[in-house]
Image (cartoon, coloured by chain):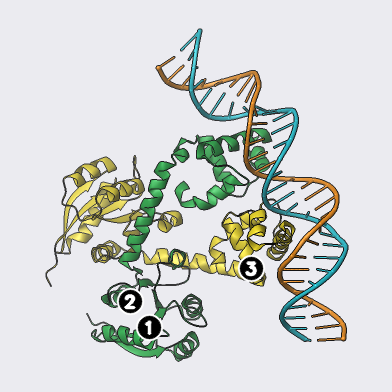
Chain colours: A green, B yellow, C cyan, D orange
Amino acid sequence: MMEKTKKILIVDDHPLFRKGIKSVLQEDTGIEIIGEAGNSAEALNFIDKGNVDIIILDLQMPGMSGIELSKLIKSKYKNILIILLTMHKDERIFNNSLEYGLDAYILKENAVDEVLKAVHVVADGNFYLSPSMSEYMIQKSMKQKKLADENPGIKNLTEKEKEILNMISQNRTTREIAESFFVSYKTIENHRANICKKLNISGCNALLKFIIENKTLLS
Amino acid sequence: MMEKTKKILIVDDHPLFRKGIKSVLQEDTGIEIIGEAGNSAEALNFIDKGNVDIIILDLQMPGMSGIELSKLIKSKYKNILIILLTMHKDERIFNNSLEYGLDAYILKENAVDEVLKAVHVVADGNFYLSPSMSEYMIQKSMKQKKLADENPGIKNLTEKEKEILNMISQNRTTREIAESFFVSYKTIENHRANICKKLNISGCNALLKFIIENKTLLS
DNA sequence: AACACATTAGTGGTAAACCACTATAATTCT
DNA sequence: AGAATTATAGTGGTTTACCACTAATGTGTT
């Protein structure tokens, strides 16, 4: 099987870091580093010349951030693959990584051959994620699970209460919910109060707030 | 390089489907199918005997669902890898896939060799996602982006207004926000009103509701 | 039969958020 | 210098949501 050489552009504001990536990728004969850029403007200039297959991109850069740059690239060049490098386990960026058009999310703290692995995975049309990042997410979910076990309120809710909670999360007011169920406004208020008791929460907009914080818990 | 044989368990309630997966995987000498199960209980029994490396798991099953099963497996056996097969593009499951402990998310509509690909990717310690699923997510993000462009309100917000919106999203009340800024309650109320005008929203809890619906848009 | 619980509905009150204004000082842009 | 915007602060009023009760009806359990 004859593979096409992958043409790669490295975008990072630290020359030493670029050097590091280069030395890792150089060993692979299927990879050709065709350019480097120290900031987003340089990167865009280079990309406009065409030819780039994969971009290895640092998140933290002066000026335009890696995320903004990747959005821009993906909107202009659908076929360019983007590998994002970052220092931090940023959940929000990871959660939106696909929507940002990213093809890989790599933590800099990880082993050097991560980059090489990622290049092959994304070139194969797949999404790559640093194992330590997924590890972290799993850990986080364990904590959340524990939290859910400590707050057993959710599973004590009746079907009707769950339905109401669901409608609240869809931005319906108590009155609207009452109307759609053909019951009194006061009935729904009672349900809300009961739900709050079961969930052990109180205060203004307590339920709406609870939903924001526990969206994942409800599914 | 001598690879270890991957021992696989297939869990699906349709025997014909299991057969299909088997015939695909059989061609690979590095893979050994050591068992099949038609439901979650059977699967758990088999797993308890040890030996399983990777589980190929159907989401839709009578009784315990694939998600519940995978949570259970991951909590007991940290090292077993799970490949989830599903009929539908279920965003919610995908978004929580890592928290559920999944290692791959494959759509049944995809080509048969997806499963084979996924086995290798997850065995390599990486997360695998059906390209058509990521395609779908990107498409969805394009729509969302378009929506954001049509509602240009967000980028018209001043720094202070963004700060306030952020604090609202952190469940702080108007009074709390006022206190932390050492300004009057009424000032923050004015800011809220201005934000609402810019975002073209109105009604009770409008801002909190807006945040729920546009969480991704704000980042 | 007695009990727990869910669902229904009510009274009366408080707090938070929103709505529609007005108004002033500071800043920024032209 | 003048205009627009931002940040500040206020009056007065409405709606929504929460809080603390009471209470009737039905349903299912023991």
Quadrant for residue D16, please give it.
top right
| Nearer-the-camera pick, A17 or B112 | A17
Q: Quadrant of the N terminus of chain B?
A: bottom left
Q: Amino acid at mark 3?
A: Ile
Asked which quadrant contains residue B185, the reply is bottom right
Position of residue B15 in the picture relative to residue C21 (left or right): left
Q: Is residue B129 visible?
A: no
- Of B96 and C29, the residue lying toward us: C29
> For the residue marked with disc 1, what is the amino acid?
Asp
| Disc with the residue nearer the chain's start (1 vs 2) | 1
The image shows residue A29 at horizontal and vertical percentages of 24, 86
| Rendering coords of residue D15 (x, y %) | 74, 45
Residue C8, percent from left and from top:
63, 28
Residue to which mark 2 is pinned: A123
**Chain to which the residue tagged by mark 1 belongs:** A
Is label 1 in contact with label 2 (beta carbons under 8 Å)? Answer: yes
Residue B144 falls left or right of residue B57: right
At numbered mark 2, what does the secondary structure look like: helix, strand or loop? Answer: helix
Q: Amino acid at mark 2?
A: Ala
Where does label 1 land, which residue? A53
Count residues near mark 1 (Cα–Cα under 10 Å), then give few for <14, some for 14-19, many for 20+: some
**Residue at 32% over, 65% down:** A132
Q: Could you tell me which residue is drawn at 24 percent across and 84 percent down?
A: A28
